[in-house]
Amino acid sequence: MNITCKILASILTPLAAVNTAVLWVGRQVSWVLIGGMVMVIGIQVFYRYVLNNALPWPEESARVMMIWMMALTAPSAYRYGGFVSITMLLDALPDTIGRIINLVLIVMAGIVLGYLLHFAIKHYHSGFIFRSSTLKIPLSYIYVSMSVGVWAMLSVNLEMGIRALGQLF
């Protein structure tokens, strides 16, 4: 194993371990959030159709749980290939060229994620000005989900980039 591969492996091993743990926690919290959404929507259906008295808060709370669930599961989908991708072209190319193109795409995705993180943080800070309409919590508590999700996706992107770079060597 050459020195470049050893350096990449020394960076990749702890990063992959941290990503594995963080993504596992995110998926477990997401299961709880899905259960919470089902319960809240069930309560709303009961109140609306049985008691004929719709509650004001279940729709917004279910939406908040859905937003957080998405932010916590998207990094896992990214890492494990759960997003839609068309790989016909990469599969048809010689291995080295396909790996280079894959690395370029990972770098481009990292740039987009960095750009998104910049706006997510700005959006988070602006959320302290307003409160949600029925839950009366600062919107920043909802907006921070985007920052959390994008940070985790950036970490996964870094891991994928190091793996792709290692495959070139």
Image (cartoon, rainbow, N blue to C red):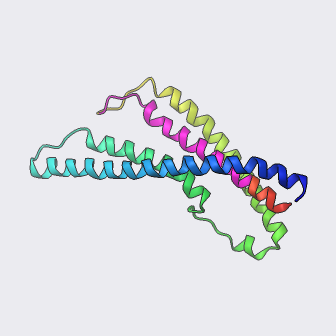
In the figure, residue 149 lies in which quadrant? top right
Q: As displayed, is residue 132 above or below residue 105?
A: above
Q: Nearer the viewer, residue 75 or 2?
A: 2
Identify the residue at the far top of this view.
129
In the figure, residue 81 lies in which quadrant? bottom right
125 is within the stretch colored magenta: no
Identify the residue at the far bottom of this view.
92
Q: Give the range drawn in magenta.
A: 135-161
Q: As displayed, is residue 79 above or below residue 118?
A: below
The percent coordinates of residue 140 (x first, y second) are 46, 30
Q: As displayed, is residue 77 above or below residue 92?
A: above
**157 relative position to 129: left or right:** right
The percent coordinates of residue 122 (x first, y second) are 57, 30
Identify the residue at the far left of this view.
51
Q: As displayed, is residue 109 above or below residue 169?
A: above
143 is within the stretch colored magenta: yes
